[in-house]
Image (cartoon, rainbow, N blue to C red):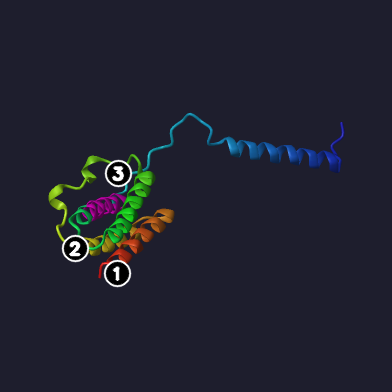
Amino acid sequence: MDFFASRRQLLTAASVIGIGAAGATALTGCTDTEPDPAEPNANLASTLRHARHLHAVALHLREEGELDAETWQFIIDDHAAHIETLERLTRPAVVDDTLEVAEEDVPVDVDSFREATSVAVEAAVEDCLAVEGDLATVVAEIAACRFGHLRLLS
């Protein structure tokens, strides 16, 4: 029995192990099991609730003819993207009917929308400081976007 291996044998073994590890890594996502649901997070729920609220208000104000439709569409598209991103990141933990916007909660003018946006900016900053890692980055970007909307409407 020979305990010494040639360089060729070592390189072959290393290649086989490397290819096997790469293949196993590539196939990790190919299972029928569902991922663990996200942990409920009150801060993400708050950010999502504000996004839904601002989206509903912007839709309403666009229909009312306040400001130009192009500006409102820009704001509406941003809030729709925020909702989609937050729902994807938190599904199904915080996506429920309690986050829907009630009709009476929709401001009726641009000044009310500015105030709601200002409150949402402050809330998103607080939420950003309360979450960790990549989620903090997402919430910070949403806060910055909301601040941009506030400046746009000033």
Q: Secondary structure at mark 2?
A: helix
Figure quadrant of residue 74: bottom left
Q: Which of these two is toward me, 98 or 130?
A: 98
Mark linked to residue 94: 3
Query: Does the magenta stretch mainly form a helix, a strand or a loop?
Result: helix
Upstream in sequence: badge 2 or badge 1: 2
Q: Secondary structure at mark 1?
A: helix
Assess whether residue 54 is covered by the magenta stretch. Answer: yes
Assess whether residue 52 is covered by the magenta stretch. Answer: yes
Query: In this figure, which residue is indicated by the disc labeled 1?
Result: 151
Residue at 39% across / 56% down in the picture?
138
Local crowd at mark 2 within 10 Å, few (<14), some, or many (≥20)? some
Q: Which of these two is toward me, 90 or 152?
A: 152
**Residue range corresponding to the magenta coloring:** 43-59
Local crowd at mark 3 within 10 Å, few (<14), some, or many (≥20)? many
Label pair 2/1, CB-CB below 8 angstroms = no
Residue at 20% across / 48% down in the picture?
101
Task: Specify the amino acid type for callout 2.
Answer: Val
Query: In this figure, which residue is indicated by the disc labeled 2?
Result: 110
Local crowd at mark 1 within 10 Å, few (<14), some, or many (≥20)? few
Q: Position of residue 38 (x, y in %)?
A: 37, 42
Q: CA distance from mark 1 to mark 3?
A: 30 Å
In front: label 3 or label 2: 2
